[in-house]
Image: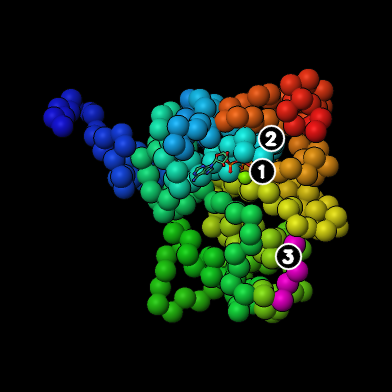
Amino acid sequence: MNIVLQPGQHYEGGEPGDSPSPPGRVKQEGVDTTHGAILYLEDITVSFDGFKALNKLNLDISVGELRCIIGPNGAGKTTMMDVITGKTRPGSGTAWFGQTIDLTRMTEYDIAHAGIGRKFQRPTVFEQHTVFENLELAMKTNKRVRPTLFFRLSSEQKGKIDEILKLIRLRGEETRLAGLLSHGQKQWLEIGMLLMQEPQLLLLDEPVAGMSDAETARTAELLNELRGKHSIVVVEHDMAFVTEIAQGDKVTVLHEGSVLAEGSMQQVQADERVIEVYLGR
Ligand SMILES: Nc1ncnc2c1ncn2[C@@H]1O[C@H](COP(=O)(O)OP(=O)(O)OP(=O)(O)O)[C@@H](O)[C@H]1O
Ligand SMILES: [Mg+2]
């Protein structure tokens, strides 16, 4: 490769397809959202042995948006999250985090530290630690908090933990071992751990799967409290839950690796194509 830089130009990383790729276009000052977009996927294609799990997928998420993504099994919803978090490299297409960060050139680790938090379906909390310790551990792994040998929580940090405890409905449970929590409480704790990392973008894959109706309702409340404070992408099959959190916001329907429909919940529910492939079954 022969690169000639002009004055004022900067070389921004390796060749497309390099693996593991260099942290190409990360700006130290963080994600640049001057144009209002936190995430911008364009023409993303992912093939598994010739099968296109994603097929020229386009998706645009604004800063502070709460976007629900629905669609039948195998539509490519989880694969889309895998691309955003660097777990899967797209065969083609671009994925931008803000204006300047090219996600397709970064490692999973660098993407997490650039500010994208992801919740998988199964809760992954430290079962042998208390609720409080789980949140404290999450804070310690936050790159923005300078790690020291004798880490002591400042009153500001304790305040932050308390605020999260309240949000995730676990105030009063802070000394309980995480392993003793209900499935729903573990899910909330994991969301709290992600929030301790102060993500710019939060990805939740089927957060209410396996929850009781009461837990699902409380999760909807929780997400409504986060509305506008974080940019969030939620994948769910539970339509009552999606209706509860989508409110008037845009919902995206994925089918066979691309966007089938996009609009308010009311609009997509009335869309013949959506009824045919998903809602009508
Ligand atoms: N690593 C892989 N190797 C081969 N095929 C894969 C791989 N990962 C996903 N797929 C296929 O890609 C398609 C999309 O899968 P994906 O998990 O993204 O769907 P989804 O929309 O999340 O579905 P669900 O609602 O069931 O979670 C499926 O047909 C799946 O079998
Ligand atoms: Mg999935």
Between disc 1 and disc 2, whose residue precedes? 2
Side of 281 where 175 appears, left or right: left
**Residue 65: mark in rendering:** none
Q: Is mark 2 within 8 Å of ligand 1?
A: yes
Q: CA distance from mark 3 to mark 1?
A: 18 Å
Residue receiving disc 2: 71
Residue flagged by tag 3: what amino acid is it?
Answer: His
Q: Determine which quarter of the picture holds residue 133.
A: bottom right
Circle 1 packing at 10 Å, graded few (<14), some (14-19), many (20+), is many
Residue receiving disc 3: 183
The picture places residue 260, in percent across and down from the top left corner, at 65, 24
Say which of 55 and 27 sits in front. Answer: 55
Q: CA distance from mark 1 to mark 2?
A: 12 Å
Between disc 3 and disc 1, whose residue precedes? 3
The picture places residue 254, in percent across and down from the top left corner, at 64, 31
Colour convention: rainbow
Residue receiving disc 1: 234
Q: Nearer the viewer, mark 3 or mark 2?
A: 2
Residue flagged by tag 2: what amino acid is it?
Answer: Gly
Look at the image and tell me whether residue 155 can be seen. Answer: no
Q: Which residues are magenta?
A: 180-184
Between disc 3 and disc 2, whose residue precedes? 2
Report the predominant secondary structure element of the magenta stretch. Answer: helix
Say which of 104 and 136 sits in front. Answer: 104
Circle 3 packing at 10 Å, graded few (<14), some (14-19), many (20+), is some
Q: Quadrant of ligand 1?
A: top right
For the residues labelled 1 and 2, say whether their Cβ atoms are less than 8 Å apart. Answer: no
Residue flagged by tag 1: what amino acid is it?
Answer: Val
Element at badge 1?
Answer: strand
- Identify the residue at image location x=42%, y=69%: 147
